Image: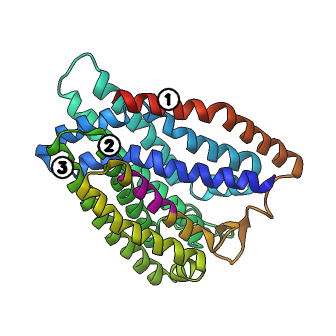
Amino acid sequence: MLYVVIVFLWASICLYLLLGGADFGAGILELAAPRKHRPRINAIMSKAIGPIWEANHMWLIIAIVILFVGFPDVYTTMSIYVHLPLTAMLLGIIARGTAFVFRHYDAIEDHWQGIYARIFTWSSMITPFFLGVIAAATVSRSIDPEADGFIAAYIDSWLTVFGVTIGLFTVAICGYLASAYALGTVTEQKDQTLIVRMAKRFIVAVVVAGALVFAAAFYSGIPLTNWIFGGIVGQLAIATATLSLALTFVAFRRRNASAVRILAGFQVVMILLAATYQHYPVLILFRNGDGLSLIEHAENTKTITALAWTLLLGSILILPFLFYLMRVFGKRM
């Protein structure tokens, strides 16, 4: 049953990146768009994410609950050593949600609409940035359980060059996902052209940010190249992601929205697989060479079994209705 829990953990993180990432990307897309196109981008993205934007955080909640119940050592370590970026990320989620509601449902339209817009767009970028920083901290061996000072324990554990580049890479991915998903919500030719143009820009941003990640890893002595290209799984993942990127440009030219969405999601899944497979089942790598494994540091068998059955039964009860909700609102749009 332990592997059932691990699969749910990986799937929830993956789905949060795919769906929640596209959600954050709505604000990133608006922030990155030329000023004259921002009102139109706002209208397109609000229509795309409006009905289900809050449901995307369900995947983050599931991941947190799995760590809290099934892997308390991992949960405790992250809560202690990366609590500052975690707090920044959660504050970003709150600020973004609040700004989205008041921006679109405020009864009075005045100068506050501009303030809400700025809060929404900037928090949409800050939140995935810190999500990437947190992810980088878990694998970069920057967390030092033997640190005896505030800076060493709570700042140096996540504020690294590698962490910053992973944060930027995550932001670029979210913008790309949002633009790819949004293509299916627009019907006018000029809107499709605008979204495709933004998507191509974010593809360039993803490639550039990815190059910066490898440069930062080399500078920091992190064997990222070996993690990704040192095994057949990583090699195949990157090869298929690269091939699918070429197919994406064909889908852009044909304005095939369904193909663009599928290919964009597939590429992100392959990137996540390549980045995590090589050091599985270790989830957190410490500076002293130790680590926290999902196998060795799991809770007792009874707890894991109960958690696994809860996840299985919960998915049977909840997921069909969630996908039905997405399908219904997708037709209405």
- Looking at the image, which residue is at 57% across and 78% down? 227
239 in relation to 150, above or below: below
Instruction: Please identify the dominant SS of the magenta region.
Output: helix
| 137 relative position to 39: left or right | right
CA gap, disc 1 and disc 2: 17 Å
Q: Secondary structure at mark 3?
A: helix
Three-letter amino acid code at the position of disc 2: Gly
Report the coloring of the rendering: rainbow
124 in relation to 54, above or below: below
* The quarter of the displayed image where residue 107 is located: top left
Res. 155 visible in picture: no
The numbered disc on residue 194 is 3
Q: Does the segment drawn in magenta span residue 266?
A: yes
* Picture coordinates of residue 211, whole percent (x, y): 37, 76
Most extreme residue toward the top is: 107
Q: Which residues are magenta?
A: 260-269
Residue labelled with disc 1: 325
| 186 relative position to 78: left or right | left
* Picture coordinates of residue 38, whole percent (x, y): 18, 42
Are circles 2 and 3 on residues that touch, CB within 8 Å?
no
Name which of mark 2 and mark 3 comes first in the sequence. Answer: 2
Residue labelled with disc 2: 184
CA gap, disc 3 and disc 1: 28 Å
* Picture coordinates of residue 235, whole percent (x, y): 53, 78
